[in-house]
Image: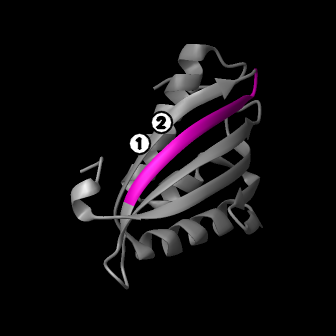
Amino acid sequence: MKKIVPPFTKESAKQKVQIAEDAWNSKNPEKVSMAYSKDSQWRNRDQFFTGRKDIAHFLSDKWKNEQHYKLKKYLWSFTDNRISVRFEYEWQETNTGQWKRTHGNEHWEFDEEGLMRIRDMSANDINIEENERKFN
């Protein structure tokens, strides 16, 4: 597969979003972390951290608590080296069994090699019933 690098077109931005969605749905922290630059800066809700090791650690902890995780990302906008997405995902909380749907936005900035160097994420969780799930 050809590496997708800036500057983005509408088509390449959509491809980048789909690749990210597929990787996150794999729930493989090491695989996902490789899409980010070695010194990638993250804001995930109220958490801030830097680098692939911290990204993989965060994702590993995240997916221990989020069973049956299923994510969908939608391209919102793009420029030469930035992409914004809207996303939603559903999951079941490990400790309580409560189903949740998370809605949010991410803003991404990429380096010249196509690795994400900045990820800024905001999201909200809502409780749902299992029969309200959109993604199975």
- In the image, what residue occupies the spot 51% across and 44% down? 87
- In the image, what residue occupies the spot 37% across and 85% down? 95
- Residue 56 horizontal/vertical position (percent): 57, 65
The answer to whether residue 94 of the structure is visible from this angle is yes
Q: Quadrant of the N terminus?
A: top left
Q: Provide the residue designation for mark 2.
A: 19
- Taking the magenta stretch, the answer to whether it contains residue 67 is no
Describe the element under mark 2 as helix, strand or loop: helix
Q: Nearer the viewer, residue 100 or 71?
A: 100
- In the image, what residue occupies the spot 42% across and 75% down? 64
Q: Amino acid at mark 2?
A: Ile
Query: CA gap, disc 1 to disc 2?
Result: 5 Å
Q: Nearer the viewer, residue 10 or 5?
A: 10
Q: Amino acid at mark 1?
A: Asp
Query: Dots 1 and 2: beta carbons under 8 Å?
Result: yes
Is the residue marked by circle 2 packed among few (<14), some (14-19), or many (20+) residues within 10 Å? some
**Drawn side of residue 42 relative to residue 65, left or right:** right
Q: Provide the residue designation for mark 1.
A: 22
Q: Which residues are magenta?
A: 80-90
Q: Is residue 120 above or below residue 79?
A: below
**Drawn side of residue 134 relative to residue 41, left or right:** left
Q: Nearer the viewer, residue 69 or 124?
A: 124
Q: Is residue 73 above or below residue 112?
A: below
The chosen color scheme is one colour
